[in-house]
Image (tube, rainbow, N blue to C red):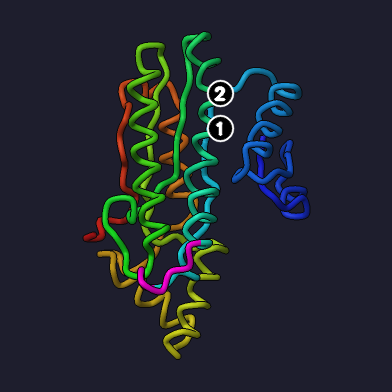
Amino acid sequence: MVVARSSSELAGVGLDYIAADLGTTEGCQLAVTETERRLGPIDLLVCNHGIGSAHERLIWEQEPAVWRETMRVNLDGPFELARLTVGGMCKRGFGRLVFTSSTAGEKAEKSGSAYTASKHGVIGLARAIAQDAGPFGVTSNAVLPGWVKTAMADRSATAESERRGISVEQVWSERAAIYPQNRVLEPREVAEVIVFLCSDAASGVNGEAITVALGGIW
């Protein structure tokens, strides 16, 4: 089951989908209830939704509304989804939760107080769930990607290029230069780590924050 806010985007995925705002309690409840109605109990939960930091400012210029919106989407949503699903996993004696944090979950970025704090919080949430649910055969981990070539990252590159007066291509070139391979990640490279963490092979991995960033120094 795939969940996002846009039905038009979801329709092209080729999987069952639900259009819902996972930054709200109601949206999370709808996603869980409808998934269980259609597909049965939820044993795998991947929280990959989020809002970026392209619109953020230095802390003394930061709008409180930006902070609240970022926390609503990036941290409140994953909490609600976990709260609604982990109990069932524990009763059944199996479950896998994977939360997409960021390299900003361990190292702060400039003009990104809300994003950085939310992604730090996601790691803490994953580790707290690991302690609560671990005795019942349930694992909870976080992945911390570096720059990935996604639509959201493209939007942030556009915003940065406009702010700095440089080309979008130059922004991506600078991002690639962070990593020894002089490139950014492909979504597949992050997805394959998530798939591993959801598998039986990862039964011994719990409460970890796994960086997927091509060996970049953060």
Please tell me in which quadrant of the rendered image residue 205 appears.
top left
Where, quadrant-wise, is the N terminus in this rendering?
top right
Q: Percent from the top left, x then y, of residue 33?
A: 70, 26
Check residue 167 in the rendering and tell me which mark sits there, or answer none.
none
Q: Which residues are magenta?
A: 58-64
Provide the secondary structure element on which disc 2 rests. Answer: helix
| Amino acid type of the residue that numbered disc 1 sits on in the rendered structure | Leu
The residue at which mark 2 appears reads as 85
163 magenta-colored:
no
Where, quadrant-wise, is the C terminus in this rendering?
bottom left
The residue at which mark 1 appears reads as 81
Q: In this picture, is 209 found above or below 86?
A: below
| Amino acid type of the residue that numbered disc 2 sits on in the rendered structure | Thr
Q: How many other residues sit within 10 Å of disc 2, few (<14), some (14-19) or many (≥20)?
A: many
Mark 2 vs 1: CB contact within 8 A: yes
63 magenta-colored:
yes
Please tell me in which quadrant of the rendered image residue 56 appears.
bottom left
> How many marks are shown on the rendered structure?
2
For the residues marked 2 and 1, what is the alpha-carbon distance in whole angstroms?
6 Å
Q: How many other residues sit within 10 Å of disc 1, few (<14), some (14-19) or many (≥20)?
A: many
Residue beneath the point at 71% across and 33% down? 30
Q: Outermost residue toward the bottom?
A: 165
Provide the secondary structure element on which disc 1 rests. Answer: helix
Residue beneath the point at 30% across and 56% down? 214
Q: In this picture, is 204 found above or below 210?
A: above
Q: Percent from the top left, x then y, of residue 99?
A: 44, 39
